Each structure stands twice: as structure tokens, then as C-alpha cells.
Amino acid sequence: MSQAVKETTLSQPSNDLIPPASKAEKSSGAGGYGPGEAPRWEDYSKCVHCGLCLNSCPTYRALGQEMDSPRGRIYQMIQVERGRLPLGEAFVRHMDLCLDCRGCETACPSGVQYGRLIEAARGQIQKYYRRPAAATFLRKVFFRELLPHPRRLEILGRLLRFYQRSGLERAVLASGLLRMIPGNLEHAARLSPRMEKPFFFSRLGTVAPAVGPRRYRVAFVAGCIANLAFANLNEATLRVLARNGCEVAIPPGQGCCGALHVHAGWRDLAREMALKNIRAFNAGNLDAIITNAAGCGSVLKEYPELFEQVGQEHYEEARRFSARVQDVSEFLAAIDLNRDFARANLRVTYQDPCHLAHAQRIRSAPRRLIQALPGVEFVELPEAEICCGSAGIYNVVHRDIAQSLLEAKMQRIDETGADVILTANPGCLLQLRAGVAASNKPKRRVMHVVELLDEAYSRHPKIAPLL
């Protein structure tokens, strides 16, 4: 850590003592941010540096560094805005190490919206900081050339499915070849999701009818990678909604929600993707727009934030769209739930996805659904609110911290004695499955809450199976 950054950790004045940069200072180039969206005074000035966020921050717990805590990062944002700290390597390193789990928002007594701050800071980094050539290339391929393009994703999915099922993957991993390549390629390969058949892309543009009388008409957000690796989860979600009287439209023209782009600072591209989805779900007679991915849901609900400073003409469109978005657990817990469940003698625990618990503030809904299942013994997971280390692509880019978080999480899960680990986000499912695979209980199941509901419905003797 540079001496300049060290010095900022020693004396942290109240934000009341650091007014926003004057127009003269900004015009003279004193501010360290470039044109466009940046962390705003009205957001970061709410931080009073009380430190109540520290214990909720996974990176502070792991590293013990003030500059890797929420208040430390906010302080650095202020220093960049004031021109006292360059938008350079040290600043980028501390911003990149944040998991954007937003646990600090739950802990904060002042209502600091930290997610807005870290995402705006990363937007500045994406625009004005030059990363190493290899990192720049890989980020461009992943964020710009792959995720926004369903056809390219489908082609990649078919190639990966052949690789995984032909025996090539097993042979490559066993050979140790990937260890000879610099970086975390072997680790990423072991974390890569399994491609499921058939891909959910075939469902786009279709409508799944309600079982029995139609009570609701909803639309379903299929996602991007979820169409390849979580097709079975998506199908389970449709079946559960249908069992609860929902006619489910899966609009054509929808695509990646842009959550990974927002978290990584690709805000201009995220806006393009947001507009595409807003217009795809434009039907006015929907009771809700349903997602089964916590990370996607939080960004879908926050689409208006993308248009507050740029593209304000689309703000109202985004606001109307976001007002109808609901997580599947949020929706099901709020209706008269169909309780025709088969009995299941299971001991289960639940890991709160960060963007469901902290960003969307949804904690009780998934627990109520779990507790509605007959025969299921629900055991609360100690520190369920602490990130599991997935955080989008964080577990690939920052392997050591992610692994330490996962190991701590698996220890806590072991304390519950659960047969099944439940969660509500695809990234968490992948991370927890990796933890189970490396544990002494490799047969322990990891499931989405809606998958357990689907299983309980399908086993009920009075209910005909749904395809």
C-alpha cells in the first residue's frame, strides 16, 4: 500500500468537514473523476464514519484493513473527488476487492446506499483506468461480446456441454495441464456450471398455462447464463408458479439483465440491456415480473438508478418496469400459497443471498416458504447474512478471499447438520456446490428454495406431474 493511502487511514475527518468540490476546483481539474456518473456528495455525505459496518464487511473481516472496509472505501472516493488521491492502482485495487454484497447497508444506521457508490466508482474505473492488456481483453470478451448475445451464449453452451459430457473435461482436469497456465484457469474450470439439456432458450416467446383457474398473469425473466446452466431451475420455477394459478409469459426479445455489468462498472452497456428488457416486458396486464435470481432481481429493481444522471428520458419507463419486479419467493409468500405438498423428512438450512437480504431486504419470505413444507425441519444458519464468496465472478478473480469465505460458510453449515442447503441465487448455488464437493459430505444437496417446493409438489399423490 502506498504511503499516500496509508496516511488517509490515520485521520478520517467527518464528511461535514469535507464539502463537495467547488465549481472552480472542478473546472481546474482538481477532482479526480472524469466526466459522467461518479460517486455523489448526496450519497457519500451520509456516512458518519461510525464503523458499525465493519463487522458486516467480508473483506474487512478477512483482511483487517480499514481501506478494505465500506467507510474506508467511501473515504477514498471522497479523496479522489477532491483530487487528493489519484484514480490509480491503489484506489482500483481497494474498489475491486469489494464483493458489493451490501451487507454494510443493512448495518448502516445512517442509510448510506453503498451499492450506488461502489457501482459509480467502478463506472469511473471502467471508463478512465487502463487495466493490463490481458484483463482488458478478457473483460471485453465476457461483458461486451458474450453476455449480451443469446445466440453466442447458446453456441458456447453447446460446446461446453460436449466438453463436459464427452470426457474431455475430466481428462483435461486430471492431466494438470491447466495448472501450467498462469492465472486461475484451473480454479475457474472447476467452478464452471454444468450445461443442462434442453437449454431454456427454447422457452422464449412461449406462455406456460396455469394449473386450474388462472389467478395471476406474470412474466418470467429467463436470464442469460441461466438459460444454459440453470434451465432446470427455470423449469421448476414455471411449474411452481403454474401450481399457484399463474399463467407465465416468457417474452421474446429479453436478454441478460446487466447485473454483472453494473457491478463491474459497464454502465453504458447495462443501460442498453436495461432498455431492451424494459421494452420486452412492456405488456401492461401483468401482475408481476418474476425472477428467481437474487443478483438479477436487485438490479432489475434498480434500473431507474441507471437513468438518473444519463438518459433521463427513459427514467419513467424504468421506474414503471421496476415497480413490477418481484423475486419468486417474495411473490409466492404474498399470495394464498397452494399447500398440496408431499411430506419430506429433511433437515434444511438457508443461506441468504446478499442481493436478496441486503439489496432487496427480503429475508422472511423464503423462510416462510420453507416452513410451509410438511416434515421439513428448518435450522437457522449462523451468520447466514455473510457472503458465501460467490459475488458474480469474484470467486474467480479473487480466489483466495472467496475461498476463505466459502470455508467459513461450510463450517457454519456443518454446525446445522442439514441434509439440504437452500439458497435463492444461481451464483450462490455454484459456490455452495463447490463447497460441498470439497467437503466430507459430498452427497449433501444444494438447492434453490423453489426447487424444493417443486419437488414437494411433484411428489404429492393427488397432483398429476407437470412436464
Image (cartoon, rainbow, N blue to C red):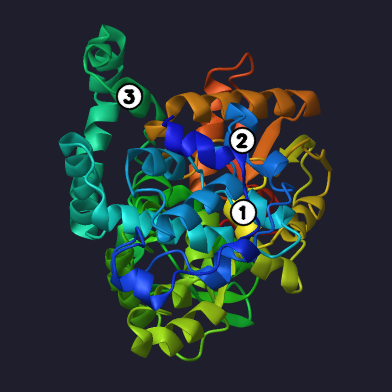
Estimate the x, y position of residue 286 in percent, counting from the top left: 52, 85
Q: Is residue 208 among what the camera can see?
A: no
Amino acid tagged 3: Asn
Quadrant in the picture for the N terminus: top left
**Cα–Cα gap, marks 1 and 2:** 33 Å
Secondary structure, mark 3, is: loop
Secondary structure, mark 1, is: helix
Q: Which mark is residue 450?
A: 1
Quarter of the image where one finds residue 108: bottom right
Q: Earlier in the sequence, mark 1 or mark 2?
A: 2
Which residue is more in the foreground, 100 or 192?
100
Quarter of the image where one finds residue 339: bottom right
Q: Nearer the viewer, mark 2 or mark 3?
A: 2
**Cα–Cα gap, marks 3 and 1:** 32 Å
Left or right of 331 on screen, residue 75: left
Estimate the x, y position of residue 27 in percent, counting from the top left: 30, 73
Q: Nearer the viewer, mark 3 or mark 1?
A: 3
Quarter of the image where one finds residue 410: top right
Q: Earlier in the sequence, mark 2 or mark 3?
A: 2
Question: What is the crowding at mark 2: few (fewer than 14 residues within 10 Å), some, or many (at least 20)?
Answer: some
**Disc 2: which residue:** 60
Amino acid tagged 1: Val
Question: What is the crowding at mark 1: few (fewer than 14 residues within 10 Å), some, or many (at least 20)?
Answer: many
Tell whether label 2 touches label 1 (CB within 8 Å).
no
Tell whether label 3 touches label 2 (CB within 8 Å).
no
Q: Which mark is residue 184?
A: 3
Amino acid tagged 2: Tyr
Q: Nearer the viewer, mark 1 or mark 2?
A: 2
Which residue is more in the foreground, 97 or 197?
97
Residue at x 67% of width, y 47% of height: 352
Residue at x 68% of width, y 34% of height: 420
